[in-house]
Image (tube, rainbow, N blue to C red):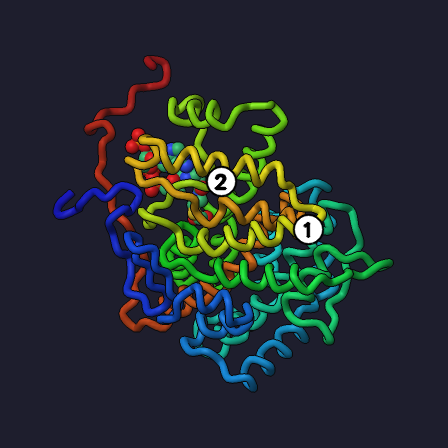
């Protein structure tokens, strides 16, 4: 196999050069386009951060207002597109429905799926505007509830919340702290360099597949419990510990014994080996939001805190440098905000969308970009001859 080097799961392989996101895993540093995540989460709206991640600079007031207005005016889906959701069984998980919806979006925009600057810009705006609508309808379908239309007088994030959780009869009663909290959580998820879903988007894009289908592939990669699906798995794990009356210490003993592959969901990270800066920010929100919200499950929060407390002192977790990651507390906050468990990973997808788009665009704009094509070390049979059927 010549000069091929084995790097299982790409633990030590840089697949590209990128100007978008900087991570220092030892120091727990995360920056988008040079700006620290702590400052962005505190001071910027998600729409500003989408602009920053995709176009490289923070927008002016005028730029961001125009941008948000344009997105909100484009959140409507083609009526025929709305029918797509009716084909899925009730109770479909919204993630595969979202991914199918994004693929379908490419067929509704088939005159603008090229790789040239104008088409890429159109696809960027369409995806940013319509993925939240698709995500909301995927959820509405699972509940058997009617779809709402977007409203021009609401912000981008408000429109998403109302489309997903409002009803025609009552609309949606906005709570400023929920809108602000969701904004900050979306900012924290906006990009994370070459993680599994982003690498997927870049790899699919490297074959010159269009932006829509590349992003749909990212949604699929995100859905797994080791990646974005972890936020749902964490809540399910905490609920199981409570419902089965398991002592958190005993649960961790099972994890350490690696029984039936049980993991402490929401712990560990390929890159962060001291702390995940996103988790540090989220933990502050968890305390604040859960203390105020009637939906907040304080029992689950206290189980989570207890698990964290024990794990951080336990030699198994310490020696492997396992710390809480972004997903450990995010599900508890989403729940406290009144969001259903099945929507947690969808919220992650809506947050990660600008990152996927920015990374795809970066690859597409690189004149030296080539198709991604990893090699392998072959460990199968040597040459052997086919045995006729009657002799096998
Ligand atoms: N619970 C128990 N043991 C763990 C955990 C965990 N959560 N994570 C890693 N380990 C152990 C693992 O078994 C291995 O032990 P050993 O050396 O004895 O074989 C060691 O720690 C190294 O782990 P690894 O699996 O080689 O690490 P990785 O870099 O391949 O995986 C990870 C990273 C995030 C997939 C993994 O830590 C994990 O599965 N965590 C739980 C799922 C989770 O929370 N995922 C969200 C990640 S952050 C946000 C996102 O990407 O969406």
102 left or right of 176 in image: left
313 vs 183: above or below: above
Q: Quadrant of residue 303?
A: top right
Label 2 SS: loop
Q: Earlier in the sequence, mark 1 or mark 2?
A: 2
| Quadrant in the picture for the C terminus | top left
Along the viewing direction, whichever of 45 and 387 lies nearer the viewer: 45
162 vs 43: above or below: above
User: Tag on residue 225?
Assistant: 2
Q: Quadrant of residue 311?
A: top left
Which residue occupies the extreme right position in the image? 169
Q: Residues within 10 Å of mark 2 (few under 14, many from 20)?
A: some
Q: Residue at x 63, y 43 (%)?
A: 341
Pinpoint residue 213: horizontal percent, then vertical percent: 51, 58
Between the residue at mark 1 and the residue at mark 2, the CA separation in whole angstroms equals 27 Å
Along the viewing direction, whichever of 118 and 149 lies nearer the viewer: 149
Q: Residue at x 39, y 24 (%)?
A: 258
142 left or right of 231 in image: right
Viewer-nearest of labels 1 and 2?
1
Q: Quadrant of residue 102?
A: bottom right
Q: Is mark 2 within 8 Å of ligand 1?
A: yes
Pinpoint residue 5: horizontal percent, then vertical percent: 17, 45
9 left or right of 37 in image: left
User: Tag on residue 293?
Assistant: 1
Q: Residue at x 60, y 59 (%)?
A: 182
62 left or right of 360 in image: right
Q: Residue at x 28, y 35 (%)?
A: 319
């Amino acid at each position: 196999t010549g000069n091929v080097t084995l790097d299982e799961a790409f633990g030590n392989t840089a697949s590209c050069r990128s100007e978008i996101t900087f991570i220092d895993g030892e120091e727990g540093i995360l920056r988008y386009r040079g700006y620290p995540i702590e400052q962005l989460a505190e001071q910027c709206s998600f729409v500003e951060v989408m602009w920053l991640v995709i176009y490289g600079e923070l927008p002016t007031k005028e730029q961001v207002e125009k941008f948000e207005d344009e997105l909100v005016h484009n959140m409507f889906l083609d009526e025929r597109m709305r029918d797509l959701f009716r084909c899925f069984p009730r109770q479909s998980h919204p993630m595969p429905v979202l991914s199918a919806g994004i693929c379908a979006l490419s067929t509704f925009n088939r005159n603008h799926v090229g790789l040239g600057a104008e088409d890429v810009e159109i696809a960027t705006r369409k995806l940013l505007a319509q993925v939240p609508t698709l995500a909301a309808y995927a959820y509405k379908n699972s509940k058997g509830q009617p779809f709402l239309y977007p409203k021009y007088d609401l912000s981008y994030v408000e429109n998403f919340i109302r489309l997903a959780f409002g009803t025609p009869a009552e609309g949606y009663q906005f709570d400023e702290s929920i809108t602000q909290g969701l904004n900050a959580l979306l900012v924290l998820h906006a990009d994370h360099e070459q993680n599994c879903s982003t690498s997927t988007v870049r790899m699919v894009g490297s074959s010159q597949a269009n932006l829509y289908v590349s992003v749909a592939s990212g949604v699929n990669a995100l859905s797994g419990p080791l990646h974005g699906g972890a936020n749902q798995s964490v809540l399910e794990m905490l609920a199981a510990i409570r419902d089965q009356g398991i002592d958190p210490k005993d649960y961790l003993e099972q994890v350490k014994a690696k029984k039936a592959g049980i993991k402490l969901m929401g712990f560990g990270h390929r890159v962060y080996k001291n702390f995940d800066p996103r988790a540090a920010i989220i933990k502050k929100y968890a305390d604040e939001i859960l203390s105020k919200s009637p939906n907040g499950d304080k029992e689950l929060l206290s189980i989570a805190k207890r698990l964290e407390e024990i794990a951080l002192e336990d030699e198994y977790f310490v020696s492997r440098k396992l710390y809480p990651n972004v997903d450990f507390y995010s599900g508890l906050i989403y729940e406290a905000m009144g969001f259903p468990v099945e929507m947690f990973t969808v919220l992650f997808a809506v947050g990660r969308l600008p990152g996927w788009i920015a990374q795809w665009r970066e690859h597409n704009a690189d004149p030296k970009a080539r198709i991604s094509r990893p090699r392998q070390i072959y460990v199968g049979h040597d040459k052997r001859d086919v045995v006729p059927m009657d002799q096998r």
